[in-house]
Amino acid sequence: MPCSGAEYLVFIMGYSVVAGAAGRLIFGYDSFGNVCGKKNSPVEGAPLSGQDMTLKKHVFFMNSCNLEVKGVRLDRTALCVSSCPEEQLDSLEEVQLFANTSGSFLCVYSLNSFNYTHSPKADSLCPRLPVPPSKSFPLFNRCIPQTPECYSLFASVLINDVDTLHRILSGIMSGRDTVLGLCVLALALSLAVMFTFRFITTLLVHIFISLIILGLSFVCGVLWWLYYDYTNDLSIELDTERENMKCVLGFAVVSTGITAVLLVLIFVLRKRIKLTVELFQITNKAISSAPFLLFQPLWTFTILIFFWVLWVAVLLSLGTAGTAQVMEGGQVEYKPLSGIRYMWWYHLIGLFWTSEFILACQQMTIAGAVVTCYFNRSQNDPPDRPILSSLSILFFYHQGTVVKGSFLIPVVRIPRIIVMYMHNALKEQQRGALLRYLFRCCCGCFWCLDKYLLHLNQNAYTTTAINGTDFCTSAKDAVKILSKNSSHLKSINCFGDFIIFLGKVLVVCFTVFGGLMAFNYNRAFQVWAVPLLLVAFFAYLVAHSFLSVFETVLHALFLCFTVDLETNDGSSEKPYFMDQEFLSFVKRSNKLNNVRAPQGKDSLRNEEGTELQAVVG
């Protein structure tokens, strides 16, 4: 990334970690500035702060049945306790007995348990009686009252009072084990699909397509059933439940549309399955010359995991950045820092840009290895360590090319997200029909531009590996070459890319289905729509990282093929680099019996007059 952008991201990371306190969000905290479950530092002016709460991991609200919102503050006293009272406590004697037997003190820390029944201040320092039964819940590790009347009031005041960012972050953290499990599932599915493509046959393609159809249909059915279940649940009173219901509807509509489009495409392309198998066999033959290409995604996946963990940690810190303020009675409130929490927008751009940069490095590495193997005259003497050679060239000479290419993707995607947000805002207000139509058209244009840039970047990386030119020159040369030879590639890339895309859909489909089943159990207190979206995005990213090996090899092969046609004519003086099996496949797939190199052209020249040649190494 450019120095200014990278330095600013490093600044955000450092400042958010120093100013933030993700532990407050993950473990919960009391009213006196103590984070539950850890040893705390004292807050000046708060005598009950700085206590060791290592054994007290749960947040208990003294008046959970009588919570009120005063101004912008929630009027409540919260304590860190070692366990939640699972039985109703009707008197101070029972509260004292519970403290002595369980070691969980439900009165303010300054009051000794012996004085629960003797101190005249006990009524104000102890919870209001009766204390309802409660149990711990992952959301901020709070003790949730279990009686219906207390539960309803507690949830409607406390959960709805939490701002959207904290609800999102708490949804991620309370379901962190589920999110991690789903990420592992996505990894396993991606590996399975990748090795299926490695040894693909006609039967496997039919089984693969059948699984896609069944999986998509099943996910759509489950989503619509969940939406029906939400709409018929009369107990929906919380913002979390309403948000989940809206997101389920959105998921259902989008998945149904995607399913319908894919079913139509599968029906249209069904007669090209045999050619698809041949295409993957040729691709696998190219991979066999550098078999370690299949392990390249493992490094990419490891780097992505490291970056994602770092990104989430910074996000949590941004969401909890605040300064402690001592209130009346020695209680502590945290005031959000002005400006710092809005840095997460730039942090979001960093997520897109850096993820695309990591994936682009993989594409550049694979393209370089394929180019080295393709333009090797001696079949008996294969190039030595093509992957390491490609990596070294990337890091020493072409970092700027990858930075430029990866930056174009968020430049298009961020405005698209903004336009979609504005369109949805106008839709909710039920006005601006013309503006909504224009925004919808803009979204379509941005989507088409996004897909075109992804394809352009890949071809630019391959051209850079061939010629060693910069990104802009390589992109221009690639467009010029492909426009002159599009007839050779039009009918080939479409169904090859489509099958690879179906593999990514299969991974996302079954990962999302597992997430739906897991997250639905905590529908009341957990905004699971955002964690599910993150899991779906992560599943697609992992699937793209693994399956893009075949996609990158396929595109690199055909670009090398077109360069081969432009620079050679098949004669003894200028023989083709391609083998006859590859050439005959292109002829059959395009139904052209007389495909040959253009006569009278020895090479393709760009505007600067430099010759586009095959460069080995």
Image (tube, helix red, strand yellow):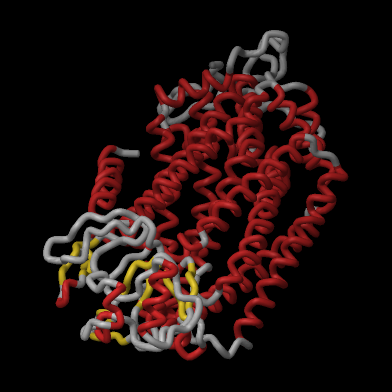
Q: How many marks?
A: 0
At 80% from the left and 59% from the top, the residue drawn is: 267
> Is 497 positioned to the left or the right of 271 in the image?
left
**Which quadrant holds residue 306?**
top left
Residue ranking furthest to the right:
203
The answer to whether residue 248 is seen in the rendering is yes
Q: Quadrant of the N terminus?
A: top left
At 51% from the left and 82% from the top, the residue drawn is: 146
Nearer to us in this view, 267 or 313: 313
At 58% from the left and 19% from the top, the residue drawn is: 386
From the top left corner, tell me how far across and down residue 191 is, in percent: 68, 41
Nearer to us in this view, 198 or 78: 78
> Is 508 positioned to the left or the right of 389 in the image?
right
> Is 329 positioned to the left or the right of 154 in the image?
left
Nearer to us in this view, 606 or 182: 182
At 27% from the left and 74% from the top, the residue drawn is: 108
From the top left corner, tell me how far across and down residue 223 is, in percent: 66, 72
From the top left corner, tell me how far across and down residue 354 is, in percent: 41, 44
Q: Quadrant of the C terminus?
A: top right
Residue ranking furthest to the left:
45
- Above or below for 401 versus 4: above
